[in-house]
Image (tube, rainbow, N blue to C red):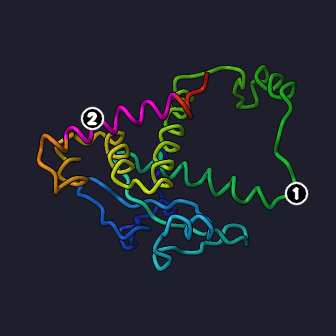
Amino acid sequence: MATKNEFYKDFSNRTSYNDIPCKDDEVLVPFVTTYDEARYYRFNMDNLETWKFYGKRVLVGFTPVRSSAKDSSMKLFNSDVHEYLNRFSNISDDLSLDQMMDDINDPDKNAKDPTSTTATEDLELFYMALDMLIEFYDKCQQPRKSSCIRMLSEGYSKQEIAEQVTPELKKSRAYEFIQQTQKDGLKLFLENFHIK
């Protein structure tokens, strides 16, 4: 777990990229974005900030996550910053497979076997596919389905989703919408995002 020191910040004085306030069990965390992405997804540009890392400017937005996910979200943010900055670097930190395999046997190096598959990596791939599905719904101008899938993945109950996503529908119709969205999402996932 990350050590909470002077670099571990509280972002409660910021506003999310889409002006939606945090719920009681949520906190804001930063994420890396670009101006093109911000314009395309219609982020509120007033809520974005430009931070400097090693003299390079990085556009940053803020998004709500569950409090329990803050540490992992910050690790992801730092990783995204590193990846973003490396796009502008002439020095490649790519290694050959042979080099990686040699490093595994060296006790002085904290190496990882790149050929192995772990449950964590599988879970990350699942979340990437889920994000692609949500992004697909966003691009297709279907914010209800996007919100429904996002909230289901975050563990919200069907009742909470019905109240927030489809408040104008009666309970039975709202539940039907959620169930149909799940079926459509699974079908889309298997057709477009499933690794065969």
Residue stretch rendered in magenta on the structure: 175-190
**SS type, badge 1:** loop
- Identified at 79% across, 24% down, the residue is 106
**What amino acid is found at the position of numbered circle 2 in the picture?**
Gln
User: Percent position (x, y) of residue 59?
Assistant: 60, 69
Give the left or right position of residue 119, taking residue 16 as reference: right
Quadrant of the rendered image containing residue 20: bottom left
User: Percent position (x, y) of residue 78?
Assistant: 59, 54
Using the image, tell me which numbered label, if any, was put on residue 19: none
Q: Nearer the viewer, residue 163 or 56?
A: 163
**In the rendered structure, are the residues bearing label 1 and label 2 in contact, judged by CB atoms less than 8 Å apart?**
no
Quadrant of the rendered image containing residue 128: top right
Mark 1, residues whose alpha carbon is within 10 Å: few (<14), some, or many (≥20)? few
**SS type, badge 2:** helix
Give the left or right position of residue 172, taking residue 161 as reference: left
**What amino acid is found at the position of numbered circle 1 in the picture?**
Asn
- Identified at 63% across, 68% down, the residue is 36
User: Percent position (x, y) of residue 63?
Assistant: 42, 60
Using the image, tell me which numbered label, if any, was put on residue 179: 2
Using the image, tell me which numbered label, if any, was put on residue 90: 1
Q: Is the C terminus in the top left, top right, bottom left or bottom right quadrant? A: top right
Query: Can you say whether 117 is above or below 133 in the image?
Result: above
**183 in the magenta segment:** yes
